[in-house]
Image: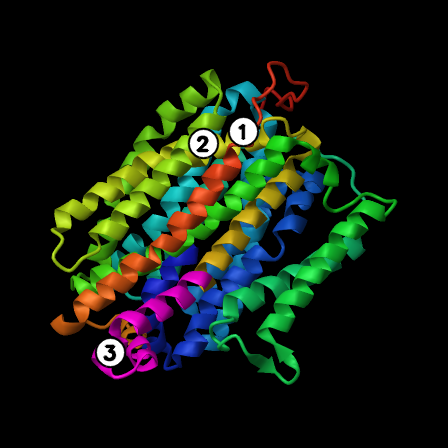
Amino acid sequence: MILVDTTIVSVANPSIMDGLGTTMVATLWATSAYLLAYAVPLLITGRLGDRFGPRRIYLFGLTVFTLSSLACGMAGTIEALIIARVFQGLGAALMTPQTMAVITRIFSPRNRGSAMAVWGITAGVATLVGPILGGVLLDGFGWEWIFFINVPVGIIGFVLAMRFVPKLETHAHHFDWIGVLLSAAGMFMLVFGIQEGESYEWGVIWGPISVWSLIIVGALVLVLFVIWQRVQRGEPLLPLEIFKDRNFSVGTGTIVTVGLAVTSMGLPLMFYYQLVRGLTPTQSALMLVPMALLSAGLARPVGLLIDRTDPRRIATFGLALVAAGMLLYFFLLRPETPLWLLLVPSAVLGVANACMWGPLASITTFSLAPQLAGAGSGVYNTSRQVGAVLGSAAIAALMQSRIAAELGGASGGGAGAAGAAGGEAGMGGGQLPEAAREGFAAAMAQSMLLPVAAILIGAIVSLWFARRPQKTNTNPIEVPAEA
């Protein structure tokens, strides 16, 4: 539900805008506020799990997430919705690192593959479920129910976590408050600048503050944060020794490209289905069902394969297959392509996802010591989220550029064409006029080359994975029998 909520609101933006009587800019902040509150604290919340126990922090985060979801559905103004979305993002940030940390700590490295496969596929499929679930709930009940649906899920999840997730050993930590401030400030400036750059046309935000100055200062603050982690004499918020593990470093770099590619793929695909082919949001999302079904169905077999063989080449194969599936979309996104043929790349991506998410998470965390599970999970998930923010910003700029290039001549100016098509797309307008469909489809196909390039870089980086050791001193935490 955490990841579903990163995509489900985008489908509902026009309905929320009409229902609350607000502007599109204000409505988009309902998504931006959630993503900021989710991405910024991940490094910190990962360490909270090490200190107070992942089960306790997970349950607290789940409570915050569920109650804030209820508040989102009951919001009567856009301001109330944005505030509730901030708390929803904070609840998500508290939960996310604990899920991976619990798996790392209760399964031995060589028996972790199946669990990591399920964890990884959940992350992959959830981003696809968002638009489908959002369309169904909007058509049947109204925008409030994209938030209300979280309440019963949250309650069930709380009961199941209380019953089945064990209490794990905690480790005494002295929090590095300077590190907390530096990481939060740096992440906020970096993520806000990248995420909102397009909104401010990559220019001035307010007074002397520009988008690029915010991004640069944010990056510098994060460099200062890393230096502080190295020189401070207490206990660091981010133990830099985790990066001495070659596979953890390679996996963290690779997951950035995965986050970028997966996030940037969906936007041109959905615009093509809706504006070129005239499908509804729900019908468009259903074109991705083969991907979701094959990803989920293959999770268990691939998980067993991870435990029995060296998963590093499975991950590389999965990344390369993702690139192949996306490249198929590049060749098939034409106005005349039969819709059934567009299910083929969706199926290819389903197999690819099963071979990518689980093996990648498994090899990355294989040698991670239990006491560093929270920190490692925080870094891994933060890296994925930063990649997602980069992908969201980059694909928006690229799509606008390609629309202007392809439709400029037909519409009397590139900027006008891009703005008109983008405005219609953003509002969920109907099918484009026939004269504009070919150019718009070409622009969307060309935009697909961005995620292809990103995931190919990830595949190349993954070649540096080392063979996992035959023996390891990283043992699972003993779980009390009563748990």
280, 313: nearer the viewer:
313
Q: Earlier in the sequence, mark 2 or mark 1?
A: 2
Does the stretch in magenta take in 19?
A: no
Query: What is the C-alpha distance between the residues marked 2 and 1?
Result: 9 Å
Quadrant position of the C terminus in the picture: top right
Query: What is the C-alpha distance between the residues marked 1 and 3?
Result: 50 Å
Please say whether residue 60 is visible from this viewpoint: yes
The type of residue carrying mark 1 is Ile
Q: Earlier in the sequence, mark 1 or mark 3?
A: 1
Q: Nearer the viewer, mark 2 or mark 3?
A: 3
Disc 1 is placed on an element classified as: helix
Residue 90 in the image, given as x and y percentages of width and height: 57, 57
Chain part drawn in magenta: 394-420
Query: What is the C-alpha distance between the residues marked 2 and 3?
Result: 44 Å
The type of residue carrying mark 3 is Gly
Residue 428 in the image, given as x and y percentages of width and height: 26, 70
Which disc is residue 74 wearing?
Answer: none
Q: How is the image coloured?
A: rainbow
Which disc is residue 315 wearing?
Answer: 2
